[in-house]
Image (cartoon, rainbow, N blue to C red):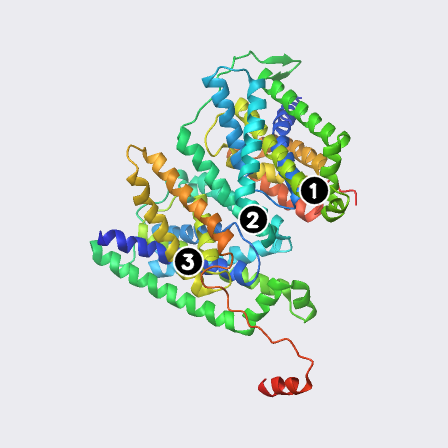
Amino acid sequence: MLTYVLSVLTFGSIYALLAIGLNLMWGMAGMVNLGILGYYAIGGYASALLTVHLGFPVIAGMVVGTMVAALLGAATCVGLVKLRDDYLAIATLGFAQVMALIAQNEVWLTNGTDGIGQIPRLGESLRGDAFNLAYLGLCFLVVILVFAVAEILRRSPFGRVLRAIRDDAMVAATAGKHVFGFQMKALALGGGIMGLAGAVYVHYIGFISPEIFQPQVLIYIFLALILGGRGNNAGAIAGAFLVVIVVEGTRFVAELVPSLSAVQVGAIRQLIIGIGFIVVLQNWPRGMLPEPLRRYPAPSDDPADQRKSMGKA
Amino acid sequence: MELGIEIAQLVMNGLMAGAILAVPAIAFSLIFAVLQISNFSVAAHVALGAYTAYVVNAAFGMPASVAVVAAFLVSGLVGVASDHVALRPLRSYGPLTVAIASMALNMVLENILRFGFGNDVQGLDLPVYRNWIIGPLHLAPQQFYNFLIASGVMIALFLLLAFTPIGKAMRAVADNPKLTDIKGINPEQIARLAVFVGMGLAGVGGVLIALDAAIEPTVGFRVILSVFAAAVLGGLGNIPGAVAGALIIGVAEELSLLAMPVAYRSAIGFAAIIVALLFFPRGILNRR
């Protein structure tokens, strides 16, 4: 049972990283990206290949995996970012599908659908729950660090420009901001965080295969961010843990129904998540922790009031 | 000479495959034209159509023509119902929110099918024909019949849009919903009709794919990239464009076999999306 709880929390941390990455791209900079599993997978694959074939230490593999995913994020910017929302959604979805094709078919590199096993795990000298607990500690540490960086960025002038671009790219450009450069940085940062999530995943599980491109994970991460509150990093983390708990909770709900096959149990679980997604979106479209928006009082006609408000500023 | 025949064979196969692809691509584009929404749940409605055909054909032993009609009605009705319950309340939050919700809806519908039919691959019970040989080219009769069904469905849709009052109303709403509202056409009703026809067509597309290949819950998701690519290539919302786009994608996917391993066939869709967005951002049949 302890092992199970630890693994649920570890997956919660991995999803939290993905959700923070998505928040940078979509929540803050307004670029919807349905290709997030592409960055997640390339981070995982890069770290796995380097540690298995070239004997890199795990930490070095994770760092390189993060950087490769960040580069891929910057590269996506070149072709895609000028597209309007729907086109961007379609194109990024296609991007992830092509990444999945590469993972399945470039057997010389990725070992195809058999996947890469025997990936060194971090802290391998530890056994059983000691490993799980230590790894969970590491995950929490990574989440806190990434959260701190994302939060500093959000409060910095950089974050303000991203939000300005999200709300109206034309206005940001008119104010002399280099929109494309900011978007590229947001995609690179977000992609890097997702790549880090992938690297954390492979060195926990010790195995990676094209199964990593499960479409439901994409839904989970969007649900996490929407549930938590788009634009809010703390919301992204809270949403991710809530989604993992709900996803795992559905396992028990589905098993309450007797005489179902494993496929049917899986189907019911995804059914619950999908319906939950739509219910959340319909009822709490801004999430549990909505992005804190600064409101400025409307200027009033009374000159005395105007002086007062100017004095306050 | 050998190569010439091979290319001719691939082009013919591509046109046949493209005609099948055109039906769900039209569905996607029609819904986009009237509602300004990318509805990703087209994939699940394709699968729903395929399973309807499976039930009608394998369980009740009906011919393909009955399956086509049944799939149109079932997918169309499920499309209207799911749109009404899940997506319509979200429209005020903008098209992107609806598009993302439609992905969740897709997951829901796909898993209902998975719950009922499992993950096993099913096939329709069809007579087996010997290939026709036309000069140096081979043509499977089933392929040709599918081509005829797809063409028939498309012609029916064009007649509907071009000559009936309903079709004119749909095009009017696509052009300017506020103005049509003033003229006494209820855009809400027209939107519902567009979803019915669109998702019905997606279901017919599913039957055509089922006639051509196998059925499983992700049958729609597997072709969805090619379907989107066809719609984007033609310009989202442009229905003749979607047909042209689908034929181009179909032929390009077949011709890619000359240069690339078959596994990367579906990457053609992505490449086409990028090319379309770089060179024809409003679609290849753009008149504006």
Q: Amino acid at mark 1?
A: Asn
Dot 2: what SS?
Answer: helix
Establish if A144 lies above or below B169.
below
Label 2 marks a residue whose chain is: B
Same chain for the residues under marks 3 and 2 in the image: no
Chain holding disc 3:
A
**Mark 3 sits on what residue?**
A239
Q: Quadrant of residue B251?
A: top right
Which three-letter amino acid code belongs to the residue tagged 3? Gly
Q: Amino acid at mark 2?
A: Pro
Find the residue positioned furthest to the front. B184
- Where residue A210 appears, as percent x and y from the top left, is 42, 42
* Position of residue B229 measured from the top left corner of the image (x, y, whole percent): 62, 40
B193 relative to A234 in the view: left or right: right
Q: Are marks 2 and 1 in contact (CB under 8 Å)?
A: no
Q: From the image, tell me which residue sits under label 1.
A: B186
Residue at x 65%, y 20% (from the top left corner):
B148
Other-residue count near label 3 (Cα within 10 Å), few / some / many at <14 / 14–19 / ≥20:
many
